[in-house]
Structures are given as structure tokens and as C-alpha cells.
Image (cartoon, rainbow, N blue to C red):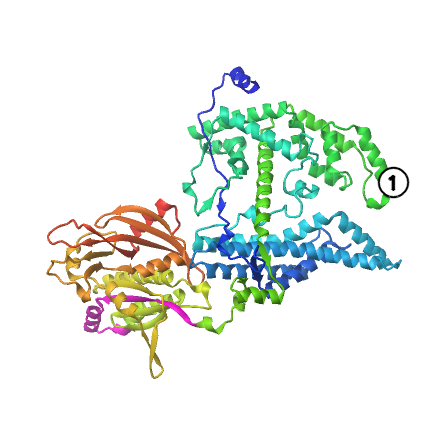
């Protein structure tokens, strides 16, 4: 009723804006793919011995420093530990990238998820166990009855660790996980997008949870979230606040409706877990209540949408303010944002709950003064340079907060809604993470490892250098690129007539730049002579990080066309004939055969002949499209059964491939396994309906490239017509036309 009165008093209608709130989406973490391990309950995993040994040593050194009397939380790690942190980051990047590359072909992202869960469990367990071992050693040294200075120091250190155990665990884990977070954001996010189309295989706040050791701890809440009362009967405890906030949000959207964003814009396959709702997304709270951001946008550009949005947010904030006032939550909300400063001001000697209670008027000044008197008596708890404890700062803060109740509280209410939502979201993620970690069985005992491995149920995650099986050095598959170079004979003849050297001309403008490109894209020369260019791309069992044979062949083909385009520009300037190129790319899932002529290796592969046919261009189609400005450079036609025209090079199909690149179907299927492909459907002149696929990959130098594939239906050839019906057969072109590429990138929001 109070809310309705609020509207009627101001003669206000609900704003003309309906915010689109985003639910919490995350990749599906499905461990049912894996066989159960030796205990028939959990999934067996084994982590690289080199990785775990280095991590254990790092954790021990960090804990020793963080619990010593000389180094604690405010100090930077020593040079020795910093170097170990850097090495740990390198090992983490190595083991994760190796696992991702080995899982990419089957798009089994759950293997990467299992590795991340295994590392998370290993680190959390190791940090806890190592600290327990340090405590046990210290206790043992103080139980000897010795009154030496070292024994007394160890006793003090033991007592300090016991009183600050959760702080120590959180500090050390945050330092280690920060290295992992840096690797994830700087390297692995891009790699996952290229391989799986997923920015995060496990949600970032879940993977790097601050709540692993305790969901409620003063320093954790003060520094990472917001401080909450741990008394379940208090109005400012988590459970009561959650209920109150959900009820207030329900009132707000009843008067100011929202819309739930469609999941169609997700960039990766994911699920919306039933335990997560739009109320668990901090960004939604900013959308509903952040008037400051909207006003900042309006100061730069004024639109009706922004005006309506601001009106909506002001109304929502009014309802929020009124509701919190009725629930007596406004003063506590203002108080919790003063606690971190006051907690530090009083040297962490006053419990945040005591500070909070005084600010909210739940205890009087006498209670605080009595606490000060007791602290003065306990000199051991105070540093010699501490100033005299006084209630003055606390009282001044209390007075300031009561004045703030009468002022605009928009910014702090918006911040509170975001902070509380983040805490609630992370609590849910932490619970989900614990459930997943319980399914992981880390094996370290050699007998258990051997038992699991011999039964084929061990999931091993090693550094790249540790995969040393000689059987894995063989070629697993290969790709052939055939480039049909046309016009070279004419150019050679013309250059010769002019008294110029054809060899140096071609070497400078064609063969040399292509040789450099071959290195960048990992190709190997099979045959390059005259108008024939045949290249191969091998994938080796021992190098899963290089399993991009088709993607790189497509990239090289596109680059070769660019070289020819530059060569043609030079030829036109010099009045020489131009070159034409038709490229075919074929994939074979087997290793090629090799013959040897002395020291020369001769490769035998059926893919060579097929690539040769794909690179061809029909004379009839060349004449037909000679004066047509095409967006595509490859078209394939089916010969009718009654047609007297015979397909060229023994094919029942014939093709137009002029400065184009055609991919065979098996190569396209292989490309699908190599990288994640986004798709869109469209229509193009001369080819009709088609589907476009876009993905990204890295070359040998780890430079990123974008590959675009067009899939169209083969057309049935008919004489004396401009319309050709489609068949059910398909062909694939590597899109190289600049106009078409720009349109595709613009449509999909992809950077070239």
C-alpha cells in the first residue's frame, strides 16, 4: 500500500522503459561423460608430477612467509617466492593449453573442466594440509618443555595462526589463484574461444571462489563483499536480507515491469541452472538502479531511451528506498560501508559486529568505553606506537550516518544491491563447485595410479614436455593444398621478349613471399614448379597444440591469393599479362605414403588428385561469367545424366574456380573439429541460399586469423538458361572476396 501511495502522491505512472535483465548462464559442467574410477564413486585424475611438486613447494614457501613474525599480509612476497609464482603460472598455462588442444578435436570441453576442477581441488587441499602440517610442527616444538626464545616464538606464532587461520588460507590461495586468473584472462580465454567457442569453461567467480574456506569471515566480507551479521535472528543477517530483498524486487517489477533477455545471444552452449535467477546477476542491479551511470551517458548524448531509463531507475530507487526504510535497513546499509575504515582505524581490535551495533544504535557508548578499558589492560594486543583508543571517530561516524539518512542515498543503495547480489551469486557458485569437487578423485599413490591406468579409467593431465611416447611422433593425418597457377607461360614469354629475366621476376614477386607464408602457416612443399604448386600440412600425434591443418591451409590459400593480387598489380603497371589462381584443399584422415628417389622424398596421397580437380576451372564457365562481377569465386555444377557435355578431369561435376579456394567436405568436417565456428544463413547472387561459417585460429607464430567458409548446394547445369536448380550435394568455398567478408564481419560483429 505504501508503494501505491508513493505513486499516487507523485502522480507518477510507471516509466516507459522495460529493462532487459540477463539471467546467470554458465557452461554445462557435465561429468557424467567420464567413467567412474577405482572406488566406483568418483572420477580418477592424475596431475603432472612436475606441476604438483612445484606447486607444493610454492605453497609451503608462501605459508612460511605469511605466518612468520617478519612477513605477514601487508608485505610483498620475497624474490624467491615471486619467481616461484611466475614458474607456477607458466606451468598452469602449459598444462591447461595442452589439455585444451588435446580435447579440441572432439570438442570435449568437459575434459578441460575436469582438469580445472582437479587443479582447484589439489590447490585447496594442499594449502589446507600444508598449513596444518606447519601448525603441527610448531606445536611439537613447544611441547618439549623448553623455555628457549625459539620455543616461545613458536608458541606465539602457533597462537597467531590459530586465531587467523581463515585469513591465512584466503591470503595464500588468493595469491596463487591470482596467477591462474591472469593466465586465464591473458591467454586461455582467447584459446577457448578459438577451440570451443567458450570464453570460460568454468565461470570465473566459481573457479576463483573466495568462499572455499569460509562463507562468513570478517576480513573476507570486509575486503571482498559486504559485512553481514552472523546472528540468524538479526534483520541484517544473510537469510533475512535475502528474503527482504527478493520481496522488494518483486514489488519493484510489479510496478515497473522488466523483460528477461533471450538466451539466443549466448556465445556458447550453456544451461541456466534452476538455482540461479536474474536476481543473482550484479549487472542487473546496475541496470535497475544506477542513475549515476545513466546521467553520465545523458551528459554525452540525449536520447528518449536514456531519458526513459533514468525515469525508470529513479522510480525503482524510490521504491527501494521506501521499502528499506519500512524494514529499518537504511542505517545498517550505510553503516556497513564505514566498517572497513573503522576496523582499520581501531587496529582490528574492535570486532566489526561491535562497531556495527554502535553505529546502528544497538549498544551505547558505555559498552564501547568498557571495551577500550579492557584493551588497555591487555598491552600484548597493542603495538607500542598505537595511539590512545578513543570513541570519538566512532561517534562522529554515527552522527554523520544519521545525517546521511536525510540525504540522497541512490549511489550507496545501488552499490549495496550489486554487492549483496555478488555475494549471493558466489555462495551459489561455491556450493555448486563443492558438489563438482566431490566427484573428483586425485590419485597420488603409485599403486592406485597403475590400477586406474591399467583399467583405462585414469584421466591424466601432463605438461606438454611430459608426453614423450615415441609412438605419438607419427603423422596422424594430412591436408593437401593444390594451387593451379594460370598465365605464367604467357608472362614468361612476354618477359623474355622484353629481354627481362623471368626467373628473378617470379622469385621476387611470387615464390619468395609464398615461401615465407608457408613457414608461417606450417606447410611443407610437395611440388612447386611452373604452374603447379602442391603443399602439405601434417599433424603429428605428439603435437595436439598444432592440430590446425585445415584452418592453416585455408589461411595460406587466402594469403597466396593476396600475393597474386599484388603480383597482378605490378604486371598491370608494366603492361604484362596477369596471373590467375585456383586452389583446392583436401583432407585425409590417414598419414600419406612416402617413396624415396635417393634422398628425395616423394609423397603419395589420394588427396593430391582430388585437390587438383577442386582447383580446376571449366572453360565453359569462364566464358559464362567473364563479364560478371561476382562476390564468390567458386561455383560447382552437376552434369545432367542426359547432357552430352562431359565433366572435365573425369568428374561428373565441373566447377568455376577463378582466384578462389574450394574445400572438400572432409576438410570442412575436420575444420569443425579444429576450431569453433559461428554460422549464419544468407542469399547471394548467382549461388542463392547458402550458410556462412566464421571461426578463428592461430598460425605457427601464434598470430590470430579469421577463416570464413561458405557452404552452398551444387547447382544442376542446364544449357541456355540463367537459373540453375539446386541439388542435395554441397560444396565449400573459403571466402576471400573483400566486400563479402566486410558484410559478414559486420553482420556477426566479428573483427577481421
Quick one: SS at disc 1? Answer: helix
Q: What residue is pinned by disc 1?
A: 377
**Relative to residue 134, is residue 685 depicted above or below?**
above
Q: Residue furthest front?
A: 40
Q: Position of residue 570 (x, y in %)?
A: 27, 63
Seen in the picture, residue 131 relative to 481 is either above or below; the reply is: above
491 inside magenta stretch: yes
Residue 550 screen position, x and y as percent: 36, 62
Q: Residue at 10% of width from left, 61% of height from top? A: 644
* Residue 168 picture location, percent across and down: 70, 50
Q: Would you say residue 697 sits in the magenta stretch?
A: no
76 lies above or below 488: above
In-image side of 368 versus 206 (left or right)? right
Above or below: residue 29 compared with residue 602:
above
> Does any portion of residue 586 appear in the rendered image?
yes
Query: From the viewer's perspective, is 608 left or right of 625?
Result: right
In this picture, which residue range is highlighted in magenta?
Answer: 474-503
Comparing 590 with 259, the one in front is 590
Hey, which residue is sitting farthest bottom in the picture? 598
**Quadrant of the snapshot with the N terminus:** top right
Q: Which residue corresponds to the image point at 67% horizontal and 28% vertical from the top-left?
A: 331
Q: Is residue 723 left or right of residue 738?
A: left
Neighbour class for label 1 at 10 Å: few (<14), some, many (≥20)?
few
- The reply, left or right, for residue 709 in relation to residue 345 is left
The x, y position of residue 146, in whole percent, is: 88, 59
Q: How many marks?
A: 1
> Is residue 384 visible from the viewing direction of this image?
no
Q: Between 267 and 383, which is closer to the camera in this rendering?
A: 267
Residue at (41%, 57%) from the top-left corner?
697
Amino acid at each position: 500500500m505504501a508503494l501505491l501511495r508513493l505513486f499516487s502522491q507523485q502522480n507518477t505512472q510507471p516509466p516507459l522503459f522495460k529493462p532487459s535483465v540477463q539471467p546467470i548462464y554458465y557452461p554445462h559442467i557435465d561429468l557424467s561423460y567420464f567413467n567412474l574410477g577405482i572406488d566406483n564413486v568418483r572420477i580418477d585424475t592424475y596431475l603432472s608430477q612436475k606441476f604438483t611438486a612445484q606447486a607444493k613447494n610454492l605453497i609451503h614457501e608462501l605459508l612460511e612467509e605469511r605466518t612468520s613474525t617478519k612477513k605477514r599480509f601487508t608485505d610483498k612476497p620475497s624474490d624467491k617466492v615471486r619467481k616461484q609464482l611466475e614458474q607456477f603460472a607458466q606451468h598452469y598455462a602449459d598444462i591447461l593449453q595442452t589439455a585444451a588442444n588435446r580435447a579440441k578435436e572432439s570438442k570435449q570441453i568437459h575434459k578441460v573442466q575436469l582438469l580445472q576442477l582437479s587443479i582447484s581441488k589439489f590447490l585447496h587441499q594442499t594449502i589446507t594440509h600444508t598449513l596444518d602440517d606447519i601448525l603441527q610442527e610448531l606445536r611439537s616444538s613447544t611441547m618439549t618443555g623448553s623455555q628457549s626464545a625459539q620455543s616461545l616464538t613458536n608458541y606465539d606464532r602457533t597462537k597467531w595462526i590459530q586465531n587467523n587461520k581463515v585469513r591465512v588460507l584466503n591470503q595464500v590461495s588468493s595469491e596463487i589463484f591470482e596467477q591462474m586468473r591472469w593466465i586465464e584472462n591473458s591467454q586461455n580465454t582467447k584459446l577457448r574461444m578459438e577451440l570451443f567457442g567458450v570464453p570460460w569453461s568454468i565461470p570465473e567467480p566459481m573457479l576463483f571462489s573466495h568462499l572455499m574456506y569460509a562463507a562468513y569471515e570478517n576480513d573476507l566480507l570486509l575486503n571482498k563483499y559486504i559485512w553481514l551479521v552472523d546472528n540468524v535472528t538479526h534483520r541484517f543477517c544473510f537469510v533475512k536480507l535475502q528474503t527482504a530483498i527478493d520481496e522488494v524486487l518483486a514489488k519493484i517489477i510489479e510496478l515497473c515491469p522488466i523483460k528477461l533477455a533471450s538466451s539466443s545471444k549466448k556465445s556458447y552452449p550453456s544451461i541456466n541452472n534452476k538455482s540461479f535467477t536474474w536476481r543473482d546477476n550484479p549487472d542487473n542491479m546496475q541496470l535497475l538502479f544506477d542513475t549515476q551511470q545513466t546521467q553520465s551517458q545523458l551528459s554525452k548524448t540525449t536520447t528518449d531511451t536514456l531519458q526513459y531509463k533514468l525515469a525508470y531507475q529513479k522510480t525503482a530507487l524510490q521504491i527501494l528506498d521506501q521499502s528499506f526504510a519500512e524494514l529499518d535497513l537504511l542505517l545498517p546499509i550505510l553503516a556497513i560501508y564505514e566498517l572497513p575504515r573503522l576496523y582499520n582505524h581501531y587496529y582490528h581490535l574492535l570486532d566489526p559486529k561491535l562497531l556495527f551495533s554502535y553505529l546502528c544504535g544497538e549498544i551505547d557508548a558505555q559498552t564501547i568505553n568498557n571495551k577500550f578499558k579492557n584493551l588497555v589492560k591487555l598491552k600484548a594486543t597493542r603495538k607500542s606506537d598505537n595511539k590512545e583508543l578513543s570513541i570519538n571517530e566512532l561517534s562522529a561516524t554515527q552522527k554523520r550516518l544519521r545525517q546521511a539518512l536525510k540525504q540522497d542515498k541512490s549511489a550507496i543503495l545501488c552499490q549495496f544491491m550489486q554487492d549483496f547480489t555478488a555475494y549471493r551469486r558466489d555462495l551459489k557458485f561455491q556450493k555448486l563447485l563443492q558438489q563438482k569437487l566431490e566427484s573428483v578423485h586425485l590419485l597420488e599413490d603409485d599403486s592406485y595410479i597403475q590400477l586406474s591406468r591399467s583399467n583405462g579409467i585414469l584421466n591424466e593431465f601432463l605438461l606438454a614436455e611430459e608426453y614423450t611416447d615415441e609412438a605419438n611422433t607419427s603423422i596422424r593425418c594430412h591436408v593437401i593444398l593444390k594451387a593451379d597457377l594460370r598465365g605464367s607461360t604467357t608472362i614468361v614469354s612476354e618477359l623474355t621478349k622484353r629481354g627481362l629475366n623471368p626467373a628473378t621476376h617470379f622469385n621476387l614477386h611470387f615464390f619468395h613471399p609464398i615461401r615465407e607464408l608457408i613457414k608461417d602457416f606450417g606447410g611443407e612443399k610437395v611440388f612447386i614448379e611452373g604452374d603447379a604448386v602442391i603443399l602439405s600440412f601434417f599433424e603429428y600425434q605428439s603435437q595436439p597444440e598444432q592440430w590446425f591443418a585445415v584452418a592453416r591451409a585455408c589461411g595460406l590459400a587466402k594469403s597466396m591469393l593476396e600475393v597474386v593480387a599484388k603480383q597482378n598489380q605490378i604486371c598491370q603497371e608494366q603492361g604484362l599479362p596477369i596471373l590467375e589462381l585456383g586452389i583446392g584443399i583436401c583432407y585425409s584422415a590417414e598419414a600419406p605414403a612416402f617413396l624415396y628417389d635417393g634422398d628425395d622424398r616423394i609423397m603419395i596421397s589420394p588427396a593430391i588428385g582430388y585437390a587438383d580437380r577442386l582447383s580446376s576451372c571449366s572453360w565453359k564457365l569462364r566464358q559464362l561469367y567473364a563479364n560478371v562481377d561476382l562476390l564468390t569465386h567458386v561455383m560447382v555444377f552437376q552434369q545432367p545424366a542426359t547432357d552430352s557435355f562431359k565433366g572435365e578431369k573425369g568428374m561428373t561435376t565441373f566447377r568455376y574456380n577463378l582466384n578462389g579456394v574450394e574445400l572438400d567436405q572432409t576438410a570442412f568436417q575436420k575444420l569443425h573439429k579444429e576450431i569453433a565456428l559461428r554460422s549464419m544463413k544468407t542469399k547471394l547472387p548467382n549461388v542463392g541460399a547458402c550458410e556462412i561459417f566464421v571461426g578463428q585460429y592461430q598460425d605457427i607464430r601464434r598470430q590470430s586469423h579469421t577463416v570464413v567458409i561458405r557452404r552452398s548446394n551444387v547447382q544442376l547445369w542446364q544449357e541456355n538458361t540463367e537459373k540453375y536448380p539446386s541439388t542435395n550435394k554441397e560444396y565449400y568455398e573459403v571466402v576471400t572476396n573483400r566486400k563479402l567478408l566486410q558484410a559478414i564481419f559486420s553482420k556477426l560483429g566479428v573483427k577481421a
